[in-house]
Each structure stands twice: as C-alpha cells, then as structure tokens.
Image (cartoon, rainbow, N blue to C red):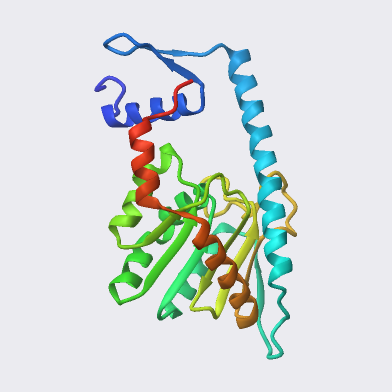
Amino acid sequence: MQNLKTYREDVHRTLNALIYKSMVNPSLETPTVYAAVELETALDVALKKHESEFRDMEIRKRELQELARRQPFRPSDEFSTYKILKRVRDVVATTVSTLNSTEKEWVAVVPAIATLFSSSYVLEDDKKFIDRGGKIRFITDITYPYVELIQRHLDMKMEVKHLDKYTGILFYVFDKKFSMSAINVDMKGVSLNEPASVLGTDDPNYAVLWTDDPTYADYLASTFELLWERAVPAAQRIEELLKEGPPQA
C-alpha cells in the first residue's frame, strides 16, 4: 500500500463500499481477488437502486403525511422567528449556535448521509453538550458502510436507533423550543459553500427552515417519539450487520 500512499484499512473500506454498491465482485479463493463488474451491469444496478430508493421515499412520504394528519399543528399565537438557511455554512453556524443555547436534550431524524455531514462539522460540539449533562437521541437508517460512524456516536453516549431505509423529512428539535427541518436534504459533499438544497433539484426555495416556534417544535418532537417507538436500537442493528458482513454482489 506504500506505493499507493494509502493504508490497508482505507483500501479495505473502499472495496467493501464498492461491493455494497455491486460495483465489485470478490472471489471465493484465498487471497481474495476483486474484479469490477461490467459497465452495463453497473449501470443497471445503479438504476434499480435509484428506482428502489424512489419507491421507499414515496412510502415514507405517505407515512409522514399520515403522522401529520394525526398530529395537526397550529402556529404559535406568540411572535416567532423563521429563517431560511440556503447555505451549508449557515446550517452549521445556526446548528452550533442553537446547540449552545440548548440545556436538556436535542433529538433528530436524519438520513445516513446527513449523519455523516453532521459528524464532519458539529461532533465536537455534540460532545461538549453531552459533557455538560445534555442528552442526544437520533434516528437514522444504518447500513454497513455507516457502522463505524454510528458506533462512534454510541461511544459518545448518544442514543441511536435504526429506521430501515428512512429517506423522509430531516429535522432537529432542541429542548422542544427550536427546530430545523427540510425534505430530503442533499448536502452535496462537505463544502461550506455548497447549497443545502433538496435532493434532485437546485431550486433555492427548498432549504433548511429554522424556527423558535414552540408549537412547531412540539409537533416535530411528538413525531420523533412515534418514530422512536418503531425504530430498532442501533447496537442491535450493528450486531446484525456485522454478522452478515458486507453485502455480496
């Protein structure tokens, strides 16, 4: 690995990710030989994956619509502030600022890619919050490539649960006072200058909404608790994934 200027663990992790995406096939012989699949096969796999994700999104959308019908909310009668955050740097800055004002707990429902994004920017702030007695709970879709990342969160004493193939609304609630929410946010990497736009569109009207409306925060918190009851503990999910090993093509 010295000639490639990388580490064996990084190569192994990359190969596992490619196997998971059905882009590489491992041999059954020892030592294992990895071979790329045919281009036509790779494109077909990618297309089927996107079709499956779209169907899952539709299912989650209907589930959340049903939750919304069961828990309708009315805007607070008191004056509330609403902010539209269109840049990742604004999302990060507002998240950190709100977290510093949070005293007891923040909860979240996030797709796995958003968990990766959050870890890139606010993990140290999360740790400080926990060290001063705060509590963090979040729900995400835990798949094999994210096992190590989720384990890091568990080691930090966060409470994490798995909701299979979750691709619905992303939201954070802080002390049931403040909230941030968006639909299918695509952070497009980790550049602070990239737009926090909705997956599949560059429409700037779709971005992250921050508000201090307690009624809306309470509505999202109630939605979180309903999903929390249905979700599976992260430790249980990780144990299952490790037993299964990386997905085979």
Observer able to see residue 236: yes
Question: Extreme top residue here?
Answer: 29
Q: How far across and how far down the image is residue 35, in percent? A: 44, 12
Q: Is residue 243 above or below residue 235?
A: above
Q: Is residue 117 above or below residue 214?
A: above
Q: Left or right of 223: which side holds 120?
A: left
Q: Is residue 55 above or below residue 95?
A: above
Q: Left or right of 62: which side holds 154?
A: left
Point out the image quarter for the N terminus.
top left
Observer able to see residue 190: no
Q: How far across and how far down the image is residue 19, in percent? A: 45, 24
Q: Residue at x 49, y 52 (%)?
A: 140
Count the marks: 0
Question: Extreme bottom residue here?
Answer: 78
Q: Would you identify the image quadrant in which residue 63 lies?
A: bottom right
Q: Residue at x 65, y 81 (%)?
A: 81
Q: How far across and how far down the image is residue 139, in percent? A: 49, 57
Q: Residue at x 63, y 74 (%)?
A: 219
Q: How far across and how far down the image is residue 182, in percent? A: 64, 60
As rendered, which of 18 and 192 lies closer to the eye?
Answer: 18
Q: Residue at x 60, y 70 (%)?
A: 220
